[in-house]
Amino acid sequence: MLDGLDPDQSVAVTAPAGPLCILAGAGTGKTRAITHRIAHRVRSGQVRAQHVLAVTFTARAAAEMRERLGRLGAEGVQARTFHAAALRQVRYFAPRLFSGREMPELLDSKARLVALAATGAGLKTDREASRDLASEIEWAKASLIEPDDYAAAAAKAMREPPFDAAKVAKVYAHYERIKRAQGVIDFEDMIRAAIWAIEEHPDVAEQVRAQYRHFVVDEYQDVNPMQQRLLEAWLGDRDDLTVVGDASQTIYSFTGASASYLVDFKRRHPAATVVRLVRDYRSTPQVVGLANAVISRARGDLSRLRLELVGQRAAGPEPAVHTFADEPEEAAAVAARCAELIAAGTPAREIAVLFRVNAQSEVYQEALAEAGVPYVLHGTERFFDRVEVREAMIALRSYRGDTGGGLVETVHLALERVGWRPDTPPAGGAQRERWEAVAALVNLAEGSPGPALEDFNAELSRRAALQHVPTVEGVTLSSLHSAKGLEWDAVFLVGLAEGTLPVIHARTPDAVEEERRLLYVGVTRARHTLWLSHAAARTPGGRPRRPSRFVPSARGQLAASPDARHPRRPLDKAAVAGRARRVMAVSCRVCGTGLFNGADRKLGRCATCPSDLDEELLARLVDWRARLAAIQKVPAFVIFTDVTISAIAERRPGRREELAAIAGIGPRKLTLYGDDVLALIGGATVDGLTDGHA
């Protein structure tokens, strides 16, 4: 059990029975340490496998733990999420707890009952408002706060609820009454039932504690008060407890999670052994060095448990810090770099683009699609599939009113009909996300190719029609919250501007510190290649923005971790600026105007300038692409997007150099498809070309 462990991991594995706190930094092998500790105790006869309960926060993590324990010869250990462990317990003891009846029906979602409760409380809500109310109720229940105490507790916690706190409390009370009347329970009720079963039923407590005698809790910084109370009920007066966590990765406080239990573990268990795991096996020393620089400025109680990581991998490239003129330019550069990495051999599935809020995803979906790079949306909806975006587009298409104030003003007036106003962003939550998504449409209006609303609607329709088919090999697009627990060879941290990270509604010192930890989590997702960037403005010529305060400056703060063996190369800002200029340096071949829209750049002309599209060639290109996609079993856009196909049919390049000048046709695609495309332009039939690929 000790082979292959580093000295600190060995101490964690062999620590004596009793309270043990493992402070494990990102990439330091915490899962390895805790599974080896469990297996070591089982295999050495200290404990029996069926007496061990290991709990974590995701089914994926629990499954991984069970798999590793099985390989280590510790079959029979129960590794579950808090919810799964509580559900199993309540179902087993249901006849004793519910007067001979089975456990009540468990709600899959609060949405329907919360909507009913809101109506009963006199509130008119839509889907997003109901979702925000459900989140507030979940926070209150996870924090052991009853409806009558909600308003005071929300004020003390400096919450920003979706409605007046007294109205939220009323909805909460109505929700509880509706549940009781319908004879159903939610997930928080189920955990409360598990607690109540032990605290109020001595026979249940005796049986549970006889079954489970040794406890392991992973991601302990994410425990909420309800889960902590369940853990204490399981333990009783015993103290054979191992907890593992990293205070610097506390990013879910808005759900009720509290790192205070990790911070105060030694105070509550004076005899506890504390082990620190700081050897980072995931990331290069350069990435580790930046992570240390980001978190070194942390303040507040959680900073007391800050760990300085030590990179163990061979040296890699320096993290790249980029500034771009606007978000379209930033996204185009990210997409181009992703394409380069894929062409150089990095699998698309090993690349991630991470952002603070889901509303940022659309510009990267567009840029990646234009570059012919497949992607997968992780934890988000596709932008044009969102209800609020579809409703906004319908409102824009159906608007019949004053258009004399210019396109942006017209868009504002049209969107007022769906309740969107530029000066009234909600404080946060799903409603803020919805507002930001519609705001992204407004931002697009500033760069629309035509001044008229119908031209803007045509541009939106073109964007929506682009194929965004998720594939396993796609670049991952994810929010920072959803990325926790994952890792990639190459990570792009984008949109790192004030107002986005930290997000504008992070107003308290604790909230700002949580935003800092979000960036730290993002940095530590990268194994080898790390890119950090921000746009000086959202749109070309837009209001200037400052870079995030959390990104260390280039003046010596990007030093590698303590054992890095190679000196840091200074960031070549001139080269970065040159690359950014090259991404955007495209002019209309008809009128000479600079082109900012991705489709216009590919076509090489403004959307309003005359086209000389070869319709017959376009038909053959589309036919060739469809057949080749079927042969290769990939979506058609992976070969070439619709816009690239149109650009080829319009520009009709005669040489490979001219073909390569079309945006979206890089060295890899030129090698794979260049000969076929030039042959089609020269008059070849599709049959003769695709037969060679079969």
Image (cartoon, helix red, strand yellow):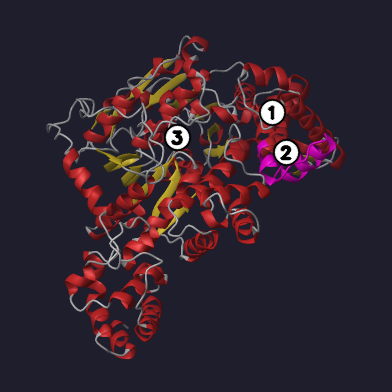
| Chain-order first, disc 2 or disc 3 | 2
Return the residue nearer the eye: 194 or 330.
330
Q: Looking at the image, is mark 3 or mark 1 nearer the viewer?
A: 3
Residue 165 magenta-highlighted: no
Residue 557 or 344: which is nearer the viewer?
557
- Name above or below for residue 93 compared with residue 273: below
Q: Which disc is residue 500 wearing?
A: 3
Instruction: Write the residue at 22% across / 33% down.
Output: 285
Segment colored magenta: 107-132
The residue type indicated by label 1 comes to Lys
Residue 114 % position (x, y): 75, 40
Magenta stretch, main secondary structure, is helix
Q: Quadrant of residue 299?
A: top left
Q: Is residue 252 left or right of residue 91?
A: left
Tell me, yes or no, if residue 379 can be seen here: no
Disc 3 element: loop
Q: Amino acid at mark 2?
A: Asp
Image quarter of residue 525: top left
Q: Is residue 554 above or below residue 15?
A: below
Q: Which residue is mark 2?
A: 186
Label 1: which residue? 141
Q: Quadrant of the C terminus?
A: bottom left
Q: Earlier in the sequence, mark 2 or mark 1?
A: 1
Counting other residues with Cα less than 10 Å from the Cα at mark 1, is it few (<14), some (14-19), or many (20 or more)?
many
Contact (Cβ within 8 Å) of mark 2 with mark 1: yes
Estimate the x, y position of residue 537 in percent, counting from the top left. 38, 40
Residue at 34%, 50% in the rendered image: 351
Q: CA distance from mark 2 to mark 1?
A: 10 Å
Query: Gap between marks 2 and 3, in whole Å?
Result: 34 Å
Residue at (65, 24) in percent of width and height: 143
